[in-house]
Image (spheres, helix red, strand yellow):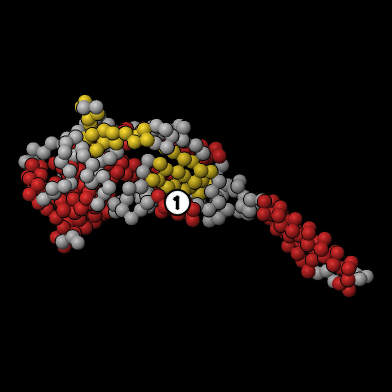
Amino acid sequence: MLSLHLKNKLDGISKCSAKGEHKVKNLFKILVNNLELWDWAHQSIASNKGATTRGIDDVTVDGHSDERVLALMESLKLGKYQFQPVRRTYIPKANGKKRPLGIPNYHDKLVQSACKILLEAIYEPIFHEHSYGFRPKRGCHDALHHINYTWTATKWFIEFDIKGYFDNINHHKLMEILSEKIDDDRFLALIRKMLKAGYMEDWKYNKTYSGTPQGGVISPILANIYLNKLDDHVERLCSKNSFGKERKRSPVAIRFADRIYKLKKEINGINPESFENKEAWEETRRQKLLEFKALQGKYMGERPMDDFDESFRRLKYCRYADDFVLGYIGSKEEAEGIMANIRNFLKDELLLEVSEEKNQD
């Protein structure tokens, strides 16, 4: 349970961010003067499976104490704290390739975790509802549920996968995006130092010129902050490419429905007294029912709505981390135009490339 003092500070950050009238200030001051924030940061690390995983040294979550945290806070205050390179390792991917992971040491994890709490207070109120990856109380099942229950009658699916996303986030662009909401040079400088810490692989130090390492505590929220610009852009596309109350019914479906209605009326109007005997009446009725059933089958095989209705369009969007998909009701040419628009935005504005082997409609 957070104290009222810290809760009020975080709520104030969230309200300032949500209003958007002013940038958020004093983050570094909150970071280095609230031991309770660090206790919360420690708890979020300690509950993870990788809590005891080592970075490049032997310091782990074991032995955590207020004294150790206070020393960290003082080091940050004095500007003496230095981030260590992450330890790079690899895990297999489903396609047979390997994904690089960067594992920070415990002290760096703790600093990242404390910064993450502050960043979540800023950005969770303004993140888009169609963003599901690495967010509190949201997950992949929520994304699938949203698509399954709200993307009705979708004609085209446009799928994207960003090429090496976590490794290719542009540091300068990321800091530019962060500075749009944050007015705190010391806090921003701390984030910049995290990004530039480098990595160790086979006992050799490597500088980092781009990216935020998968495996880092703060990496997921930084990745979401970066792609929130994409969410803004796609939201505008969805607004532009969604109009009309509902699609017109298909002309073919209308004709089938009329024939079915007339045949049903004809069947109900067959008078047994107009036949020589009961058997003749039953046979006529049976033939009409077979005709009715066959007509219903053909009707069910037709698309009920008009795919070429120029007065109706819908564009839907869902993102989970760097994987995202759009659902479109409209022409294939228009869907391809939307795909090209997003690909160009990623390249020109966010300096990212789409993985062509997954990009499809």
- Give left or right: position of 35 versus 339: left
Report the residue that reaches farthest toward the bottom.
Answer: 273
- The location of residue 150, given as percent across then percent down, is 48, 55
Q: Is residue 299 left or right of residue 181?
A: right
Residue occupying image coordinates x 89% and y 66%: 280
- Frontmost residue, 40 versus 64: 64
Q: Residue at x 32, y 34 (%)?
A: 90
Q: As rendered, which of 56 and 176 lies closer to the eye?
A: 56
* Residue 301 is at least partly visible in this image: yes
Reading the image, the residue beneath label 1 is 144
Compared to residue 204, the image places residue 286 above or below, namely below
Residue 68: x percent and y percent?
Answer: 9, 47
Q: Is residue 182 visible?
A: no
Instruction: Name the side, left or right, on which 272 lies relative to 186.
Output: right
Q: Toward the viewer: 66 or 280?
A: 66
Q: Is residue 270 above or below residue 114?
A: below
Amino acid type at circle 1 is Leu
Q: Position of residue 235 (x, y in %)?
A: 40, 47
Q: Residue at x 46, y 35 (%)?
A: 358
Residue 86: x percent and y percent? 22, 35
Answer with the quarter of the image where residue 60 lies. top left
Query: Does residue 29 appear to the left or right of 168 in the view shown?
Result: left
Residue farthest top in this picture: 204
Residue at (21, 47) in percent of width and height: 113
Q: Split into 4 quadrants, where in the image is the N terminus? A: bottom left
Q: How many marks?
A: 1
How packed mark 1 is, by other alpha carbons closer than 10 Å (few <14, some 14-19, many 20 or more), is few
SS at badge 1: helix
